[in-house]
Amino acid sequence: MDLGLKGKVAVVTGGTKGIGRGCCEALANEGANLVINYRSDPDGAENVAQFIREKYGVEVLLVCGDASKEETVDKIFDKAMEKYGTVDIVVNNAGAGFAKKDFENLTYEDWISGQDNNLNGQFLMCHKYVKYWKGLGRCGHIVNIISKACLMTNSINNQIYCSAKGGLMTLTRTLAHEVTKYGIYVNCVAPGYVQTERLYQPGSPEYERKKQFLKTGEYAKPRDIGNVVTFLCSRQARQIIGAVVDCTGGMLL
Amino acid sequence: MDLGLKGKVAIITGGAKGIGRGCSEILAQEGANLVINYRSDPENAEKVAKELRETCGVEVITVQGDASLPETVDKIFDEAIKKYGTIDILVNNAGGGGVKKNFEDLTYEEWKRVLNNNINGQFLMCRKMIEYWKGLGRGGHIVNVVAKCCVISNSINNQAYASAKGALLSLTRSLANEVTKYGIYVNGINPGYVMTERVHRPGSERYIQKLPLLPTGEFATPQDMGNVVAFLCSPQACQMIGTVVDCTGGTLL
Ligand SMILES: NC(=O)c1ccc[n+]([C@@H]2O[C@H](COP(=O)([O-])OP(=O)(O)OC[C@H]3O[C@@H](n4cnc5c(N)ncnc54)[C@H](OP(=O)(O)O)[C@@H]3O)[C@@H](O)[C@H]2O)c1
Ligand SMILES: NC(=O)c1ccc[n+]([C@@H]2O[C@H](COP(=O)([O-])OP(=O)(O)OC[C@H]3O[C@@H](n4cnc5c(N)ncnc54)[C@H](OP(=O)(O)O)[C@@H]3O)[C@@H](O)[C@H]2O)c1
């Protein structure tokens, strides 16, 4: 199936590790050129960029910065425009859980900080993109990475993350409602348990404990999520609009 | 994206017209061999089969019969095995035939007829495939075609059809929960307004009435649905389990 992404330009936030990297590789495999935002570990980022260039023969631009900050969002777009002259796809992948505490022990600063990382930065990216894209009269795509945690309540002591992801899910749907008529497709993907360098490393207690819950008996791989994200950015998925795509491997059943 | 469907064997119920035909086309384009079930109009079914053999270079057999009857389900299965020796994919597409009446005027016979066509036949097909796959200790893919009326109640005077599709949605999820551990993937698609000969024929009253409701300004095509179905049958969608993909083109927002 030719997804028609050859030569498209895709921004992936937090794209050098974990699910973000899976998205980058899946998009690159379809011939998309990349703008990869990362926050730390510049050497690691450079290695990933070089690996992707060599393996997939696409162009890769790295942009360092915290994607929850306005100046980083501006920088990502400015550099992308400078190099490629366009941005076709935005994958809002950056995001992370927050220290788990009993609700009454959370501070307002915790709340704001988790929200910055999981909702406010995504707002800024969407905002920038829609402003840029609205007048172009072409098809563009935004895919937001949410989490099963905002659809079920089994993730305890995790209100900040769950609420912010819930906000991102609803932003996806309401934004889709508003901008579909301009050719902008907005969808979100809900991963379940994805094995990354940071999470669910074989041998860790967390890995063994969660494994028993997995319907397939196996953790998802970053690339599994990347493949769905990539499909959503294709013409073939053009009836999928404002959708919350359950990629939790059956965790919500 | 290579969906890995080359040489797979797919059954599509009601696969010679409308959305079913779109599924047949896309699966054939991805290299799958087909078993197309149809109910009426054998000339059309033969024509579709011939076209797909010629354009896609795949094998296609057609099996006549009402897919809601146990004898047809057996016949589809037997003929598929006779021809190919295996079955990898089932698309439960056949359905429709809702009876639009005020609820108090809907007879029990009508209710049962609509349920037969939209959930009981699908149950029989699923049971046949699960028995077969489990018996061999191998996996497979089922995709059920539901309808947006089981998620949103704006389709008035349509209780029998909506209830049957609601049952199919729940069957999809609960069956996935049971059989994922055997490597059997059960998912669904939720079409919105799809342009078919019967349902939304260009120029028809229904077409003209529905067009302004569509966020993209266009009806979905049967091929749009086929693309999502094909993706769901691929290893790329391995984290989609019991997922009913919203393909309503934004009409649930
Ligand atoms: N893994 C799962 O099972 C799972 C399940 C549900 C949802 N998710 C979601 O999927 C997304 C990716 O998660 P992951 O598991 O792949 O995490 P990960 O392995 O920790 O990778 C996330 C990457 O994003 C970067 N990042 C985080 N916040 C950033 C920011 N504000 N600006 C720039 N980069 C940032 C991180 O940078 P640093 O290296 O500097 O920290 C890291 O490289 C997140 O939104 C997460 O909530 C993951
Ligand atoms: N079109 C839409 O907008 C829409 C929206 C939501 C859901 N759907 C669902 O999508 C599926 C396909 O609908 P469609 O719009 O493509 O309808 P369609 O154009 O009427 O085509 C349906 C095909 O399935 C066949 N069929 C129906 N019941 C059957 C049975 N019991 N056994 C064998 N074949 C049977 C029909 O055969 P005959 O030619 O003999 O009638 C017809 O060829 C249905 O499940 C429907 O409920 C459609």
Image (cartoon, coloured by chain):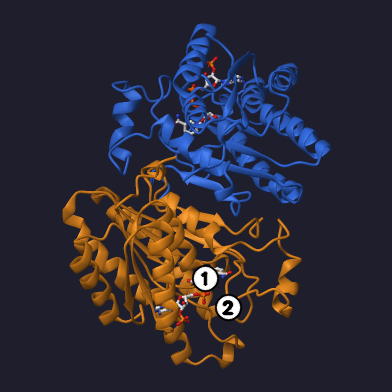
Residue A85: x and y in percent read 19, 61
Element type at mark 1? helix
Per the image, label 2 sits on a secondary structure element best described as loop
User: From mark 2 to mark 1, how far is it between C-alphas?
Assistant: 8 Å
Residue B157 placed where, x, y %? Answer: 50, 31
**Label 2 CB sits under 8 Å from any ligand 1 atom:** yes
Q: What is the quadrant of residue B76 in the picture?
A: top right
Which residue is pictured at 62% across the width and 88% down the height?
A102
Ligand 1 is within 8 Å of the C-beta of the residue at disc 1: yes
Image side of residue B4 versus residue A110, left or right? right
Residue under label 2, please give it.
Answer: A198
Q: Are marks 2 and 1 in contact (CB under 8 Å)?
A: yes
Q: Quadrant of the N terminus of chain A?
A: top left
Q: Is residue A21 above or below residue B91?
A: below
Closer to the camera in the image, B53 or A234 = B53
**Residue at 48% across / 20% down in the picture?**
B52
Q: Is residue B110 above or below residue B2?
A: above
Q: Residue at x 39, y 31 (%)?
A: B221
Q: In the rendered structure, which amino acid carries the disc numbered 1?
A: Gly
Which color was chain B given?
blue
Q: Position of residue A47 (x, y in %)?
A: 43, 74
Chain A colour in the picture: orange
Q: Nearer the viewer, residue A198 or B65?
A: A198
Q: Is residue A63 or residue B218 the one in the foreground? A: A63
Residue at (56%, 41%) from the top-left corner? B4
Position of the C terminus of chain A, as image quadrant, is bottom right
The residue that disc 1 covers is A18
